[in-house]
Amino acid sequence: MSGFVFEDRNGNGIREPDEPGVVDATVKLRDRQVRGVQQERETRTGADGSYRFADVPAGKYELGVQLLPQYHVDGVQWQDVDVKGPGGEIPAKPVPAPRPG
């Protein structure tokens, strides 16, 4: 499963060519509780704002992004994702970040 964290400069939720990726954001993927224990993976975005989680089985997950302090967003922002693709590899919807202030 992969996707991008980017500066959504026009607020439309779609990555435009002039909207840069957010470098070094923390991205978390957690499954719904399995036998009462929640499993969580973590990675960081690359130079272009991309992230990737390998070998994600099909299922329902929560994807969380924690931005760097200059974005003035506290805590982790979570969204639900449904992995359906072959081998569990699908692009997740983009995670827009506000422009740093």
Image (cartoon, grey):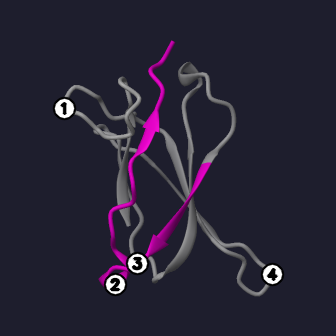
The CA distance from mark 1 to mark 3 is 29 Å
Q: Residue at x 39, y 55 (%)?
A: 93
Measure the C-alpha gap from mark 1 to mark 4: 43 Å
Q: Which residue is mark 2?
A: 87
What's the residue type where badge 3 is placed?
Asp
Depth check, mark 2 against mark 1: the one in front is: 1
Give yes or no for contact between labels 3 and 2 (Cβ–Cβ under 8 Å): yes
Residue hosting label 1: 17
User: Residue 55 has which mark?
Assistant: 3
Whether residue 41 is situated above or below residue 26 in the rendered picture: below
Q: Residue at x 54, y 23 (%)?
A: 71
Foreground residue among 39 and 94: 94
Q: CA distance from mark 3 to mark 4?
A: 22 Å
**Horizontal arrangement in the rendering, residue 36 relative to residue 32 (left or right):** right
Left or right placement of residue 48 versus residue 75 in this view: left
Provide residue 24's location: percent of width, then percent of height. 44, 37
Label 2 is placed on what type of residue?
Answer: Gly
Of the numbered discs 2 and 4, the one sitting upstream in the chain is 4
| Residue at the (44%, 21%) spot, across then down | 99
- SS of the residue under disc 4: loop
**What residue do we see at 57% from left, 69% from top?**
61
Q: Is residue 86 magenta?
A: yes
Q: Is residue 87 magenta?
A: yes
